[in-house]
């Protein structure tokens, strides 16, 4: 089985997908933007061939690269696991007749207004939303739905570029920031109050073979707009609890309606006064290396399971559900350069039995803005057999460790 894999080096866990393919016996040709000599050794050691392109989101560049491979040998799969790459990959798959997630399904997973309109028509409970192309359309939507409203790019991932607006003045300011006066189409959504989480799957031939349920504390939009408290996310090992039954049923229905066959999926959800609400789904794994947490929590290799799914159409391992696992991101007290840490050694020593790994940028490092996400600055990943205890541990680590910048 010959798999062409897009961009093996960035983000940091991309090499794991290549490794998974290599270890189950697949031949891997990688396409990326780095020169071949700049590839990390852990990538080079797991690939058969490599082609550099100017941009992996250029349809022409990717088409030409894959076509050149096909002149030499058969290509069985063309795979991308990053949100920004999946649509281009789907288009090239369709043009070249390569098996994989269809362009229609991938487009619906990328274009948020189209996705939600399509799912509402198929009975999925989701927030009201619309794609708007003018100030007048936006004001009409606001009048119909009422404030607050969520404003985001049509193809946003997570909370990237997302804003919550509370009145007409804030809406008009956001529309300018999002470039609606420059011809950009913008997604508007009804604000849904409630707790936020996500359910991820590995789906084979339309059947969910592995699933994982996770929670955000606090919700993503709050976490990406406020420096403190330090936010964390956690995947639970209590997936058989009765409270998750409706969520699992919703997830399966969305996957079926969207026409997702063999793929990783990432579905965001809210639960609040209006009940369970679908937020969005992507036909790719979650970001910030969350799959690593699933591996640590379940004593198995999800990257190899994904590789088996796309190459032989079945999986081999079982999830142990032995641990809940999570990560807490630790923000500097301000933007600038890191000058000091407090509480690192004592905290790591006290909670060391439950710590998976951690990252603390060296003194002198430039800080990253909080909206850059959970991996932007320092972080600690942990696991514990008890979900509630792990929540307390992550919160405590987030309180004890301090980063000072100037």
Image: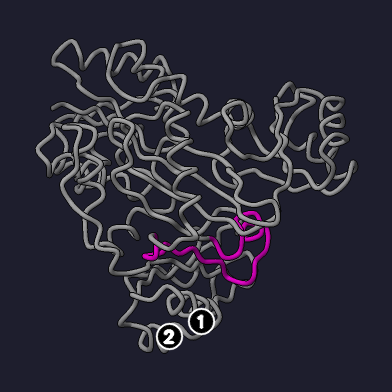
Magenta stretch encompasses residue 103: no
Height in image: 102 above or below 123? above
The numbered disc on residue 396 is 1
Q: Can residue 32 be seen in this view?
A: no
Q: Residue at x 29, y 34 (%)?
A: 35
The answer to whether the residue labelled 2 contacts the one labelled 1, judged by CB atoms less than 8 Å apart, is: yes
User: Residue reaching furthest left?
Assistant: 25
Q: In front here: 17 or 314?
A: 314
Tag 2 residue = 347
Q: Position of residue 39 (x, y in %)?
A: 26, 41
Q: In front here: 191 or 91?
A: 191
Task: Report, in whole angstroms, how far the alpha carbon at label 2 lies from the one at label 1.
Answer: 9 Å
**Which residues are the magenta region?**
216-239
Height in image: 50 above or below 268? above
Height in image: 370 above or below 283? below
Q: N-terminal of the two: label 2 or label 1? A: 2
The numbered disc on residue 328 is none
Q: In front here: 73 or 100?
A: 100
What is the tally of numbered marks visible in this picture? 2
Q: In which quarter of the image is residue 404?
A: bottom right
Q: Is mark 1 on a helix, strand or loop?
A: helix
């Amino acid at each position: 089985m010959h798999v062409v894999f897009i961009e093996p080096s960035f983000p940091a866990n991309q090499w794991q997908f290549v490794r998974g393919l290599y270890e189950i016996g697949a031949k891997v040709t990688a396409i990326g933007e780095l020169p071949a000599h700049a590839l990390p050794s852990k990538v080079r050691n797991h690939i058969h061939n490599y082609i550099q392109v100017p941009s992996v989101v250029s349809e022409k560049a990717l088409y030409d690269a894959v076509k050149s491979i096909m002149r030499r040998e058969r290509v069985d799969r063309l795979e991308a696991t990053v949100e920004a790459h999946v649509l281009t990959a789907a288009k090239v798959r369709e043009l070249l007749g390569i098996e994989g997630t269809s362009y229609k399904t991938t487009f619906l997973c990328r274009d948020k207004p189209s996705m939600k309109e399509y799912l509402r028509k198929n009975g999925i409970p989701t927030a009201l939303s619309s794609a708007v192309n003018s100030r007048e359309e936006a004001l009409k939507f606001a009048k119909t739905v009422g404030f607050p409203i969520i404003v985001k790019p049509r193809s946003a991932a997570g909370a990237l570029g997302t804003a919550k607006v509370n009145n007409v003045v804030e809406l008009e300011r956001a529309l300018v920031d999002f470039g609606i006066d420059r011809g950009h189409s913008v997604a508007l959504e009804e604000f849904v109050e409630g707790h936020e989480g996500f359910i991820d799957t590995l789906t084979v031939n339309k059947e969910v073979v592995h699933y994982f349920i996770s929670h955000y504390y606090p919700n993503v939009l709050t976490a990406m707009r406020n420096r403190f408290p330090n936010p964390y996310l956690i995947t639970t090992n209590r997936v058989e609890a009765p409270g998750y039954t409706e969520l699992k049923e919703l997830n399966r229905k969305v996957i079926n309606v969207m026409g997702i066959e063999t793929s990783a999926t990432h579905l965001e959800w809210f639960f609040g006064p209006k009940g369970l609400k679908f937020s969005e789904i992507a036909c790719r794994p979650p970001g910030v290396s969350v799959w690593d947490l699933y591996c640590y929590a379940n004593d198995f290799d999800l990257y190899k399971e994904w590789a088996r799914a796309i190459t032989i159409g079945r999986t081999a391992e079982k999830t142990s559900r032995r641990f809940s696992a999570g990560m807490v991101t630790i923000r500097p007290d301000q933007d600038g350069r890191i000058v000091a840490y407090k509480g690192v050694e004592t905290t790591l020593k006290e909670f060391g039995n439950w710590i998976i790994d951690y990252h603390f940028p060296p003194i002198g490092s430039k800080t990253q803005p909080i909206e850059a996400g959970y991996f932007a600055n320092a972080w600690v990943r942990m696991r514990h057999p008890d979900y509630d205890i792990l929540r307390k541990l992550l919160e405590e680590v987030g309180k004890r460790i301090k980063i000072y910048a100037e």
